[in-house]
Image (cartoon, helix red, strand yellow):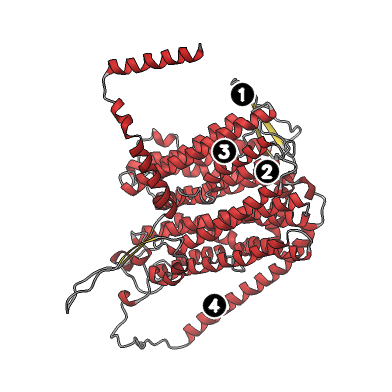
């Protein structure tokens, strides 16, 4: 290997590459060590140390405003294999290293080897392989090498997903994921083939080197949207996401949602840098797809009663918000509206960073909850805050952050998008973008409903099952990642101008025309004012909490029964559950969210016990795609008759095929 940078004692790019390789190899010793748990501990220590080296190296590369290139002499006939780290790649590397290390530490307490001896080796090995492949993917600049690493990432995620393969729902989720991800990979084969035909090389084009006005460019853009959009979870390419994230181990779900989805977004970001004149239609398609994904994703989240499935559908919503920001930025590029470009990119990239913090925080929290209560069903939880107050606090931070409420980090990125929408009222073009503001506000309102439902049904009230009646606090290895991510959510929310400086090099790398503008200082000053508001809100919350504790200690606390509408005592059966909480909101979207509803018929003077069932379905998967697969299976059933196991008939098939090909060639 060689580097284009000279004169540095230790090249940070080489450190980042080495860190990625160490993480990928961290699980290998555990495959051969016989003592249970030793491989997991070794992998965790190696992953954390590698991440501690990779994070500062990525930050140095991000702010260096340079591009570092290493070339691998691989001997394959597809051109040079280059590993390149520019500010855009360095920005996406940050969540890879951070979340991978946090998940590895969380797994020590959540998935201990003493209780999961049969799955420890495979889970640890493929976890490191997934994290490493994502980091190397961000550096790959050869199309064939990119596809190789992409496939390693996809298969590693599959083997992690089906860790508990003895369960039917896990196997089904794995099958759906495998079909969806390889459908996207097929689109990427088309993408890289046409890209190579356009440029004459398998190397990814340099920024702004291609024209978007040719028919081939439209095919490349469409293939990129399908291939990368399927991995990101953009609707209607999201069908694998809810079941995959719900059935994977929670620390794997955190990496898949917090990081792997971003690999699809990275592919779209990188593709758009190739073209110097994107048409207005591209930005319009991304904007509409993004806002539809955000709205439908959070609507499906509101309807869920499975804790992890709710979080998975919420990931679709956040991917939609990011896609909307990218689409708005692309509209700004097409119309030469630089403020719109800056606000769209800043909102999208900052939300990528924010989502990579609060979504792993919530998935780690869900793992601690499931570990304590033994169920993912929110209707069977309740009152867990008494037994696990620290986890309740961390999940509260994540819930407030994901709803975009100050002073947490989710507010800052969404505020930049709102600013872009309303700024167009003063412009002569694209003023209709202001119509996106109420739609984004509706998404935020539904997010509040969804996460109010999550938090109240899980942590408040009284326990609704024996498992929830005796919860236990998470161990130190589980609490530490939660605390770190919660603290980062709070810090970015309080000082968003610092995070804005973090994303600016990636913005300049995506669109170099913004490198010399005054917009960063202008909007940075606005975020400075928001920072003061955030500090004020945080101070008020701390003061009110301290006064409340002081009054509890000084005053005499008594308890007495409250009026219960004639009931002698309150029980779990008469309190609101997760399904009841969101029933009205779900009914508004009844045309989109299809539910399996069963209402028992009451008969006789003294009817027996019965249950009401409201089960949300995967509308697109179960009502459209699955029936199409069934129809295809019936249509091609006659082909099974050709598979009868007679070798001499198979040889006749081969002979007939060769004969027909010879006639065709002649």
Q: Nearer the viewer, mark 1 or mark 3?
A: 1
Query: Do residues under tags 3 and 4 come within 8 Å of each other at their CB atoms?
Result: no
Q: Is residue 111 above or below residue 539?
A: above
Q: N-terminal of the two: label 1 or label 3? A: 3
Q: Residues within 10 Å of mark 4 (few under 14, many from 20)?
A: few
* Image depth: mark 1 or mark 2 in front: 2
Q: Viewer-proximal residue, 365 or 246?
A: 246
Residue 455 in percent (x, y) is at 45, 68
**Could you say which is closer to the camera, residue 116 or residue 287?**
287
* Residue 270 appears in the picture as rendered: yes
Mark 2 and mark 3 lie on one chain; the one further toward the N terminus is: 3
Circle 3 residue: 20
Q: Which mark is residue 272?
A: 2
Give the mark toward the camera: 2 or 3: 2
Q: Judging from the image, what secondary structure is the residue with disc 3 in?
A: helix
- Lateral position of residue 549 relative to residue 634, left or right: right
Label 2 and label 3: CA atoms lie apart by: 26 Å
Residue beneath disc 1: 78
- Report the side of 657 relative to 542 (left or right): left
What is the x, y in percent for residue 382?
37, 69
Q: CA distance from mark 3 to mark 4?
A: 43 Å
* SS for dot 1: loop
Whether residue 115 is visible: no
* Image coords of residue 426 (percent x, y): 78, 65
Q: Earlier in the sequence, mark 4 or mark 1?
A: 1
> Toward which corner of the image does residue 365 lie, by quadrant?
bottom left
Circle 4 SS class: helix
CB atoms at circles 4 and 1 under 8 Å apart?
no
- Residue count near mark 2 (Cα–Cα under 10 Å), binned few <14, some 14–19, many ≥20: many
The N terminus sits in image quarter: top right
Q: Judge depth for marks 4 and 1 and give the one in front.
A: 1
């Amino acid at each position: 290997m060689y580097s284009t940078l000279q004169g540095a004692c230790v090249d940070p790019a080489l450190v980042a590459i080495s860190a990625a390789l160490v993480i990928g190899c961290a699980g290998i010793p555990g495959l051969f060590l016989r003592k249970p748990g030793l491989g997991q501990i070794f992998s965790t220590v190696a992953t954390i140390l590698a991440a501690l080296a990779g994070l500062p190296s990525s930050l140095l590369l991000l702010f260096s405003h340079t591009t570092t290139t290493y070339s691998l002499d691989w001997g394959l006939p597809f051109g040079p294999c280059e590993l390149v780290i520019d500010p855009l790649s360095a920005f996406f590397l940050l969540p890879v290293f951070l979340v991978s290390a946090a998940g590895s530490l969380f797994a020590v307490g959540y998935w201990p080897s003493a209780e999961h001896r049969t799955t420890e080796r495979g889970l640890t090995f493929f976890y490191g392989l997934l994290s490493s492949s994502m980091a190397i993917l961000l550096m790959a600049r050869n199309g064939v090498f990119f596809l190789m690493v992409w496939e390693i990432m996809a298969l590693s995620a599959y083997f992690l997903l089906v860790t508990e393969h003895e369960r039917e729902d896990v196997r089904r989720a794995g099958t759906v994921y495998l079909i969806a991800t390889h459908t996207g990979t097929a689109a990427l084969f088309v993408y890289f083939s046409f890209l190579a035909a356009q440029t004459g090389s398998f190397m990814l084009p340099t920024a702004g080197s291609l024209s978007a006005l040719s028919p081939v460019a439209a095919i490349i853009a469409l293939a990129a949207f399908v291939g990368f959009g399927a991995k990101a979870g953009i609707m209607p390419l999201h069908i694998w996401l809810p079941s995959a994230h719900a059935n994977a181990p929670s620390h794997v779900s955190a990496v898949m949602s917090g990081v792997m989805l971003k690999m699809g977004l990275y592919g779209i970001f990188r593709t758009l840098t190739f073209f110097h004149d994107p048409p207005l239609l591209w930005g319009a398609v991304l904007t509409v797809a993004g806002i539809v994904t955000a709205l439908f994703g959070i609507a499906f989240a509101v309807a869920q009663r499975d804790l992890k499935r709710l979080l998975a559908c919420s990931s679709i919503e956040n991917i939609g918000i990011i896609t909307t920001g990218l689409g708005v930025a692309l509209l700004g590029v097409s119309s030469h509206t630089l403020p719109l470009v800056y606000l769209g990119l800043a909102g999208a990239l900052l939300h990528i960073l924010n989502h990579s913090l609060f979504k792993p925080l919530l998935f780690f929290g869900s793992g601690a909850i499931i570990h304590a209560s033994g169920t993912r069903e929110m209707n069977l939880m309740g009152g867990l805050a008494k037994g696990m107050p620290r986890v309740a606090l961390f999940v509260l931070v994540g819930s407030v952050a994901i709803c975009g409420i100050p002073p947490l980090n989710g507010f800052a990125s969404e505020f930049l998008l709102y600013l872009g929408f309303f700024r167009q009222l003063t412009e002569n073009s694209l003023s209709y973008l202001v119509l996106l503001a109420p739609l984004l506000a509706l998404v935020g309102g539904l997010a509040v409903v969804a996460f109010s439902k999550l938090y109240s049904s899980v942590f408040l009230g009284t326990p609704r099952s024996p498992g929830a009646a005796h919860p236990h606090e998470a161990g130190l290895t589980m609490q530490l990642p939660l605390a770190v991510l919660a603290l980062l959510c709070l810090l970015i929310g309080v000082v968003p101008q610092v995070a804005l400086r973090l994303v600016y090099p990636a913005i300049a790398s995506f669109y170099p025309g913004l490198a010399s503008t005054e917009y960063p200082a202008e909007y940075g000053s606005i975020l400075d004012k928001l920072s003061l508001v955030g500090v004020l809100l945080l101070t008020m919350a701390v003061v009110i909490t301290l006064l409340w504790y002081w009054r509890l200690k000084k005053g005499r606390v008594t308890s007495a029964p409250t009026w219960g509408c004639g009931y002698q005592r309150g029980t779990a059966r008469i309190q609101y559950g997760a399904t009841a909480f969101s029933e009205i909101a779900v009914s508004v979207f009844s045309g989109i969210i299809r539910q399996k509803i069963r209402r028992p018929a009451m008969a006789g003077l003294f009817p027996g016990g019965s249950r009401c069932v409201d089960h949300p379905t995967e509308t697109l998967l179960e009502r459209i795609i699955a029936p199409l697969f069934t129809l295809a299976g019936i249509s091609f059933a006659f082909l099974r008759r050709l598979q009868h196991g007679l070798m001499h008939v198979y040889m006749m098939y081969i002979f007939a095929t060769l004969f027909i090909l010879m006639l065709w060639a002649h």
